[in-house]
Image: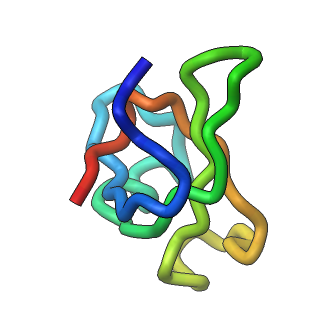
Amino acid sequence: MSDIKPGDRVRVKERPDWPMPTGYRLANLEGHVFDVIDNPEGYVLVLLDKEDATGLDTRVPLGFRAEALEKI
């Protein structure tokens, strides 16, 4: 797995295969890691900084594959 740990600051990487319509609005957003999931391995829960970016309630952690994130 990656070296991402709870509390780390991360940025969502841009990916050409993001599902539309919200995927591209997630690219380059920043937040902090809420939790790292052990089962299934490779998933990270992130609380995003920008609340109105996606139309989703970002007060709830969003799940990402670890390779979709970069530490900042």
Residue at 65 percent across and 48 percent down: it is 35
Q: Where is the N terminus found, in terms of image quarters?
A: top left
Is residue 55 positioned above or below 66 on the image?
A: below
| Residue at (59, 83) in percent of width and height | 51
**The one of 62 and 18 positioned closer to us in this rendering:** 62
Q: Position of residue 11 (x, y in %)?
A: 32, 57
**Split into 4 quadrants, where in the image is the C terminus?**
bottom left
Q: Position of residue 31 (x, y in %)?
A: 45, 68
**In the image, residue 49 lies at what x, y percent?**
49, 79
Q: Which color scheme is applied? A: rainbow
The residue that appears at 29% across and 60% down in the rendered structure is 28
Q: Judge by depth and name the residue closer to the eye, 70 or 20.
A: 70
In the picture, measured across the screen, residue 25 lies left or right of residue 41, that is: left
> Looking at the image, is 61 positioned above or below residue 58?
above
What is the number of callouts on the image? 0
Looking at the picture, how far across and down is residue 22, in whole percent?
A: 55, 54
Q: Residue at x 30, y 34 (%)?
A: 15
Give the farthest residue toward the left.
Answer: 72
Quarter of the image holding residue 8? bottom left
